Image (cartoon, rainbow, N blue to C red):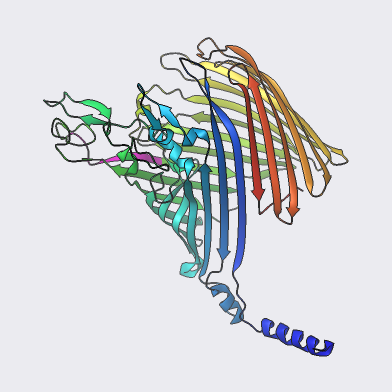
Amino acid sequence: MSRGAARLALAALALAIGHGHAHAYEFWLRAQTFGQAYQLRDYQLVGPDLFLGRRRITQTLALRITDVGDLALARRLARLPERGLRISLQTYLRVDHDFGDYTTGSITLAGPLRRDAIDVIPELADSVAGLDLMYGYLQLDGLADDRLVLQIGRVLVDDGWGSTALDGVNARYALPEAALPVAVGASAGYRVRASSPLGVTSYELDGTSGAGCQEYVEGPTPGTGAWQLIDRNRAVGTSKLTSDYEYCPQRDVSQPTVGVTLATTHTKHFGAEVGYRRTWSDTVGLIGTVDRLDYPDKGLYPNDYGQAPSTGTDEERLYARGHADFKAGSLAIEPYADARYSLLHAVVDRADAGVRLRSGDHTLEPSIEYFFPTFDGDSIFNAFSIEPTTDLRLGYRYGARGPWRATADAWLRRYAHENTTGSFAGGGEAGIQRVLGNGWRGGIDLLGDTGYGGQRIGGTAEAMFRPTQLFWLRGRVIVLDIKEDASSTVLAASYVTTSAQVSTTWRVADSVAFHVIGETDRDAIHALQTRVIGVFDLAFAPEP
C-alpha cells in the first residue's frame, strides 16, 4: 500500500470513529493491594510465651461509573435542558486473606484435645478469606424535578456520630422553596453485620462478640436452668474458612433499621441537622428440636415463664448538630455544636461544642467534648460500670504557604467515677514541620500527659527525602516513657518503648506506585516486634 493510500485509509478510519456512537460513561477506579507480615505475642501461664505469625493480603477495589445508560448524553445531543434522571454506580470491595500460622494453626484445649484456631476463635474467619462489600449502590439523581435523590443497595448512612451501612434504600428530598430551605432524608433496610451477604464486621454495633456464645439450658423446674456453651457436643468438621466448633445464632439474625433526617440547604453562614435512627432484631427461639436436651428446650434465652420478648431494640438515637461561619474584620469565626441522645439508655452519650478562630495563617480552636460509652441493646457490657469523660481542649494550627508548619494541642480530661468526685488527667502535644530544601523535609513532635491512668512523656522525629519525582524515602523514630498508675495490672509499671519506621514509595508509572513500610518496636512488655507492609497502588496521587 502506498503512503497516499495509507493516509486515506487512516483518514477514513478516523471519520468512522468520529461518527460512531459516543458513550458518556465516566469511570473512576482505585485499586490497592496490601501485604502484611507480623507476629502477635500469646502470653502463657505455664511455659514460654508463643509468637503467633500473621501473613495477610488485602485487596481493595473502588469503582464509580457515572451517567449509566447515557441519559445525560442523550439530552445534550438533543439540546434539551440538563435536568432529568442521571444514574451512577458506586462500589467499594475488599478481599482479606490471612495465611499465617495463627489463623491456619491449631489450639490445644483441655487435655490432649486440639482444635483449629478458627473453630475456637470464630472472629478469625473475618480475615482468613473475607470478601466484604463496604458499600455498593445505584444512585438516581434528578427525580421529581431535581428534588429527589435515591440510593439503592448497600448504602452509607449516619448514626449521629459516624457512618454505618444498611442494605436497602436511602432517599433525600429537597424543599428549596420553603421559608427555610431544607432537605428531608429517610432510609430503611437491614443493618449490615458480619453475617450479612458480603458482610463487614466493622459495621457491627458496639458490644457484640461471636466467641463463647451460650444458651440457657432448662432444668427440671422453672428457674433452675443454667447457661452453657451452645452445641458443646457438636461434631467438628474440616472447614478451614468458617468455625465448626462454636456459633452465635443471635449474630445471624437480621437487624431492620429505619432513620429520618431534616437538614438545612442553600443557607448562608449556618447549617443545622436533626436525625433519628432505630435498629431492632428478633429474639432467637429454638435452635434445634425441643427434646434435644435433658429437659424440653424453650429457646436460646430464658423463657420458663414466657418472659422472652419476641423482638428487642438494638439502638435508638436522636442527634442534632449545627455550625456557622461569619467574619469580624479579618477574623473568621466558625462555631459548632453536636449532640446525640440514646433513647435506649436514656443518656446523652456524645456531645461537643467549640469554635474555630481563623486569622491569616493562624487557627485557634477551644472546645469541650463529652463521651458516655453505650453498646448494643443486648450487650452484656451495658451491665458494667461505665465511666463517662469530659474533655476541655485547646488547639492551634499554623499553616502558612512558606516552609513552616506548626501544631499545638492541650487538654484536660475528667473521668466521672461512681460515688466519687472523679479523677483528672491532662497534657499537651506540639509539633513543627519544615521544608529543608533539596528534596528534604523534617519534623519534630513532643507529647506529655499525666494524671489518672499514668504518665506518658516522649517525642517523634521524622524526615522525608525525595531525590527524584519518582521516589520517596521516609524515616521516623519514636521514644515514649510510660509510667502506669497505682491501679494498673501491667507487669511493668514503668518502661520505655521505642519504635522505628522506614518507608519508601516508588512511582512505577502515572497513577501507579509501590509502597513498602517496615516497623520495629521494643519495650519491656512485648520485647522485640517487627512488621512489614507492602502496598501496590493503582490510583496513586502524590503529595504536592
259 on left or right of 7: left
Vertical arrangement, residue 494 with respect to residue 429, above or below: above
Question: What's the residue at 36%, 23% (across, down)?
Answer: 112
Q: Residue reaching furthest right?
A: 438
Residue 380, horizontal then vertical, whole percent: 35, 28
With 529 as the anchor, is 445 left or right in this view? right
Q: Is residue 185 above or below residue 362?
A: below
Q: Is residue 313 magenta?
A: yes
Question: Outermost residue, left direction?
Answer: 221
Q: Position of residue 203 (x, y in %)?
A: 45, 43
Viewer-nearest residue: 523 or 53: 53
Residue at 55% across / 35% down in the picture? 54
Q: Nearer the viewer, residue 367 or 28?
A: 28
Say which residue appears at 23% left-offset and 33% top-offset.
301
| Residue 544 seen in the current view | yes
Question: Where is residue 27, by image quadrant?
Answer: bottom right
Q: Quadrant of the N terminus?
A: bottom right
Q: Indicate whether 461 appears above or below 533.
A: above
**Visible residue check, residue 313:** no
In the image, the segment drawn in magenta is: 307-317
Of 528 and 214, the residue lying toward us: 528
